[in-house]
Image (cartoon, helix red, strand yellow):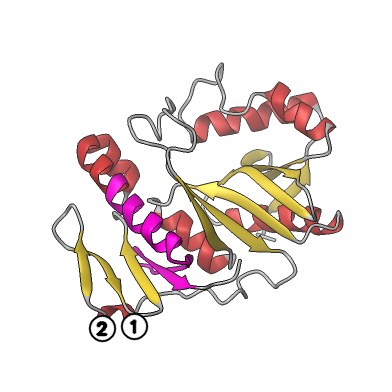
């Protein structure tokens, strides 16, 4: 637990409304049109899901939503927290899910956001198991507007210690592998050998999308092609380096 931070499940209407406002602020939408309205959050809690809220003193600094799935699984619908608190929020979700007998948790994220990939694959030790093309269709929030909403599904083994699923931190071996495709910026995009594919993403897709939307869309479609081809060959996403390179491993277990 981060010092000075408390995390609790939320059941009351006022607390759920505050979480809805938090999600609006994160995704740059009007608070009158949040990505997850308070009434939807209340319904999910009533149906057996969980909304967790992280408070730093009196300030709401993070929140997450999860629901139970079939066959000892859970699905994390959304999670957003200030820097440094994301890990604590995900561990709170994990504890809740394990307490109900869940063995895995799944969620999706934008595969072009390298910092989120690193958090999910390296810090938590989840595995990228499914590539979803334009999953949500057109989105009109202030973060994703103008792009296609591809998402990478990750599966987190809740029976293993967090971060102990064999995820790789970097792509040192990849530096020695042949370049097989170039990126929209003219630098290497893909390196591969017999058991691994390494794929680079932009340094900051959110800034790029705002400044040069056409170039951001080229990155989207180029990386999509790489992932779809690799996943069809049996590769799974297992790591992300600090300099923006995914590691995809053939035959990696979820």
Q: Quadrant of the C terminus?
A: bottom right
Q: Which residue is mark 2?
A: 176
Judging depth in this view, the residue of 4 and 125 nearest the camera is 125
As drawn, is 191 to the left or to the right of 197? left
Question: Dot 1 lies on which element?
Answer: helix
Residue 233 shows in this picture: yes
Judging depth in this view, the residue of 252 and 167 nearest the camera is 252
Q: Which residue appears at 34% of the width and 35% of the height?
A: 147
The x and y percentages for residue 7 are 73, 49
Which span of residues is magenta-colored?
A: 221-250
Q: Is residue 112 magenta?
A: no
In the picture, residue 206 is in which quadrant?
top left
Mark identifier at residue 173? 1
Judging depth in this view, the residue of 218 and 14 nearest the camera is 218
Residue 16 higher or lower than 225, as above or below: above
Residue 40 higher or lower than 240, as above or below: above
Question: Dot 2 lies on which element?
Answer: helix
């Amino acid at each position: 637990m981060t010092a000075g931070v408390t995390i609790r499940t939320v059941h009351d209407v006022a607390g759920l409304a505050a979480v809805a406002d938090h999600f609006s602020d994160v995704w740059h939408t009007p608070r009158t049109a949040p990505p997850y309205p308070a009434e939807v959050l209340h319904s999910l809690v009533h149906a057996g899901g969980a909304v967790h809220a992280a408070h730093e003193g009196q300030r709401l600094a993070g929140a997450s939503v999860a629901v139970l799935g079939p066959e000892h699984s859970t699905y994390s619908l959304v999670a957003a927290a200030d820097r440094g608190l994301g890990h604590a929020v995900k561990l709170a979700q994990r504890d809740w899910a394990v307490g109900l007998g869940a063995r895995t948790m799944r969620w999706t994220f934008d595969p072009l956001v390298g910092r989120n990939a690193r958090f999910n694959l390296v810090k938590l030790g989840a595995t990228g198991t499914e590539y979803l093309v334009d999953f949500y269709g057109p989105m009109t929030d202030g973060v994703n507007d103008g792009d296609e909403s591809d998402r990478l599904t990750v599966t987190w083994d809740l029976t293993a210690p967090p971060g102990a699923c064999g995820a790789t931190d970097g792509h040192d071996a990849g530096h020695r592998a042949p370049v097989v495709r170039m990126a929209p910026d003219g630098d290497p995009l893909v390196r591969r050998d017999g058991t691994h594919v390494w794929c680079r993403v932009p340094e900051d897709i959110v800034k790029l999308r705002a400044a040069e939307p056409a170039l951001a869309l080229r990155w989207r479609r180029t990386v999509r092609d790489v992932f779809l081809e690799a996943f069809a060959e049996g590769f799974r996403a297992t790591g992300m380096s600090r300099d923006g390179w995914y590691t995809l491993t053939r035959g990696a277990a979820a």
